[in-house]
Image: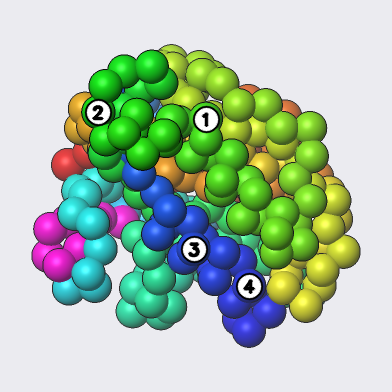
Amino acid sequence: MGKNRYLKKQTTIIGMLLLGMSITTLVACGENSKYNEECGDLVEFEVDEEYCQKYGLREEAFTLKYPESLEVDTQEDYPSKNYASFFKYDKDTLIVESVNIGYFYGLKESGKDGIGSFFGLTKESLLTSIVDQYRAQGLDIRETTMQDETIRGEKHFTVRGSINADMEDIGLAGSYLIQMVMIATEADHGVLLIMLAREDSGITSFKDFETKGCTSPILQTIEGS
């Protein structure tokens, strides 16, 4: 667990940065999740008002399902600005897949009036600052795109890129895809999923984040409650 404190620290910083925008309301896809069933049966995870108040988090309410083989870090395990983090490790305790769930709020669409335009923050500048936070800590995110992507049949503002890491002390070694997806639970706030997948995870394209590997059920099933 110690070697992964770096990533958890970074997502704590990211959580503090997150302001939001108006985007499509989160709706989960069908009940039959597609994923590598060798990862185990699906377990439900819920964040509600009580959970957020107990740990001093921005109030959101959502549910999701994840395979039982994933390691889960909640506020009880590692206090941060994330609602939860999910990890798949290899035999050497290096990260194969991960999903960190943070939040955003208050940011308006680019070019529109509101708190975002007042502070000069747009969805592009916000996610650029998150990418820069990772880079400043030694994770070189390359070949990034930043635009609306169709995920689960809806448009969500997304960052996509790749990482070549040789940082075993923090649990990263190999080539990874990274995807950051902003999903609304209501019109003006929601959750941010930061997803990593190593090349041997079975996730070899960004579309695979939806249906392959062990973490795809999280993206498939997360919905406002």
Q: Is residue 67 left or right of residue 176?
A: left
Examine the rendered structure and indicate whether residue 159 appears above or below residue 80: above
Amino acid at pointer 4 = Tyr
Q: Nearer the viewer, mark 2 or mark 3?
A: 2
Q: Nearer the viewer, residue 75 or 56?
A: 56
Q: Nearer the viewer, mark 2 or mark 4?
A: 2
The earlier-in-sequence mark between 2 and 3 is 3
Give the labeled residue for mark 4. Answer: 6
Q: Position of residue 59 (x, y in %)?
A: 18, 54
Give the labeled residue for mark 1. Answer: 124
Secondary structure of the residue carrying tag 3 is helix
* Residue at image location 59% in from the left, 33% down from the top: 159
Q: Which mark is residue 114?
A: 2
Secondary structure of the residue carrying tag 4 is helix
Examine the rendered structure and indicate whether residue 97 appears above or below residue 190: below
Q: Position of residue 174 (x, y in %)?
A: 85, 55
Amino acid at pointer 1 = Glu
Q: Is residue 60 left or right of residue 94?
A: left
Give the labeled residue for mark 3. Answer: 13
User: Is there CB contact under 8 Å for labels 4 and 3?
Assistant: no
